Amino acid sequence: MPKLLAILAVAALLAALAVTGAGVASGTHLREAKTKVVHVGDNFYMPTKVKIKKGRRVKWTWGSGTAHRHTVTEENGKFSSKKKRHGTFKHRFKKVGTFHIFCAVHPETMRMKVVVRK
């Protein structure tokens, strides 16, 4: 059953990307969305790696079927969300670098990276 929920969550994410046009070619080039969206599910982030330009935001969105509380926590303590089952959390990345993110409730299984470039 957890695999089915994960598959459904990924399908919903892909459908949302198709509706918003994120990652879809516009003319002859790809446009980077100003805000990247990461899905927070039970024991996973999707995607697990996000690349953005300096000054852009990442928005983490908890799914409606999330049974457990999770956080979005930067490993060096630069930011952290509250423990949540639903809702969103946003952070603007103002410095170039690689930021390692984890869930404070499930640090062994819920990890991701945000790579910020110029």
Image: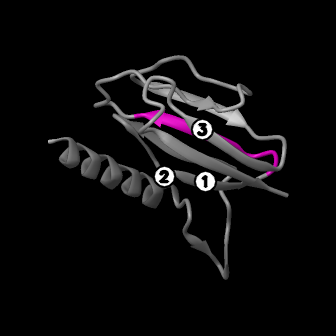
Classify 10 Å Cα crowding around label 3: few (below 14), some (14-19), many (20 and above).
Answer: many
Image point 34% across, 34% down: which residue?
42
Classify 10 Å Cα crowding around label 1: few (below 14), some (14-19), many (20 and above).
Answer: some
- First in residue order: circle 3 vs circle 2: 2
Q: Which residue is mark 1?
A: 50
Image point 26% across, 52% down: which residue?
7
Q: Which residues are magenta?
A: 54-62
The C terminus lies in quadrant: bottom right
Q: CA distance from mark 3 to mark 2?
A: 12 Å
Q: Is residue 66 above or below residue 7?
A: above
Residue 13: % across, % down: 40, 51
Residue 52: % across, % down: 70, 54
Q: Residue furthest front?
A: 108
Query: Of the numbered discs in the image, which one, if any, rests on residue 101?
Result: 3
Q: CA distance from mark 1 to mark 2?
A: 7 Å
- First in residue order: circle 1 vs circle 3: 1
Q: Which residue is mark 2?
A: 47
Is residue 97 a member of the stretch shown in magenta?
no
Q: Nearer the viewer, residue 8 or 27?
A: 8
Query: Of the numbered discs in the image, which one, if any, rests on residue 111?
Result: none
Check disc 2 and report its element: helix, strand or loop.
loop
Residue 61: % across, % down: 48, 35
The amino acid at mark 1 is: Val
Question: Is mark 3 in CB contact (under 8 Å) with mark 2?
Answer: no
The amino acid at mark 3 is: Ile
Check disc 1 and report its element: helix, strand or loop.
strand
Residue 26: % across, % down: 63, 73
Is residue 58 a member of the stretch shown in magenta?
yes
The N terminus lies in quadrant: top left
**On the picture, is 109 further left or further right than 74?**
left
The amino acid at mark 2 is: Pro
